[in-house]
Image (cartoon, rainbow, N blue to C red):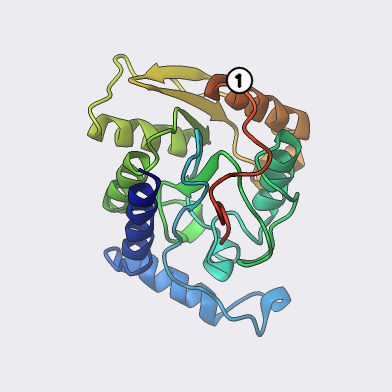
Amino acid sequence: MDVITDSVLEQVAHDVVTCRRCPRLVEWREEAARRPPRRFAGCTYWARPVPGFGDPRARVMIVGLAPAAHGGNRTGRIFTGDRSGDWLFAALYRAGFANQPTSVARGDGLQLRDLYVTAVVRCAPPGNRPRSDERDNCLPFLVRELSGLPQARVVVCLGAFAWDGAMRALAELGHRMSPRPRFGHLAEAEIGPYRLLGSYHPSQQNTFTGKVTAAMLDAVFARARRLAGGQAPIESDCPGAGRT
């Protein structure tokens, strides 16, 4: 099963990276790479859609909104190299899901344990605001990732957009809930075999204003751990799991 699962996730990643279905997003991600801010001048940008990554045996999945123009769009790994990721990976390290508290580039040694990280939309959108048609073009990737993670039971949604996208993906798998549950920090909803768990997004806007604190993120991932069934082994018995 593990070999099959790995091959499913690898095929999804390949299909994500080669996608050009949304002309507006293709133009924006490539323009961001051509005109980087001064702090990233001279950097070689990924400038392609960004695949999910993590442990193929994960019981917990994190779903974000989309890559940042000068974060994942630059590094090629979701949440890597931006301020949101600084907060997220520090929290994952404290919760035992990551082997280090920072992530600055692919190949920096980061490994995720019992966790897979992805997003609803895979290209950086202008103003961090994807359109509904762009969301719908990307949604099949999230559906396929859920199918390729047979042990996943908890979906942590970073923000209302991710909450909505996760529910849409679960509906495609035949898991629906009516009325639809409302998003909120530490909101929960049981949909089929999955438990959705809401969290405010660790964006600069939220962390600077105190809408999100380190303690609030710690509470989310402690709850995710409990819902998933307790502490996973410190070292995965799947060689190379989570390395990117």
| Residue 52 rendering spot, x and y as whole percentages | 46, 53
- Residue that lies at the very extreme toward the top in this rendered image: 179
Front-most of residues 29 and 232: 232
Estimate the x, y position of residue 50 in percent, counting from the top left: 46, 61
Residue toward you, 223 or 204: 223
Assign the N terminus to one quadrant of the image.
top left
For disc 1, the marked residue is: 226
The structure residue drawn at horizontal position 61% and vertical position 20%, both measured from the top left corner, is 226
Q: Is residue 181 visible?
A: no
Taking the spot 45% from the left edge, 76% from the top edge, the residue there is 30
Number of labelled discs? 1
Residue displayed at 27% across by 53% down: 137
Q: Position of residue 62 (x, y in %)?
A: 52, 39
Looking at the picture, does residue 188 appear above or below residue 172? above
Using the image as rendered, state which of residue 175 and residue 36 is in the foreground: 175
Which residue does the image show at 31% across and 42% down from the upper left? Answer: 143
Within 10 Å of disc 1 (Cα), the crowding (few <14, some 14-19, many 20+) is few
Among the 4 quarters of the image, the one containing residue 191: top left
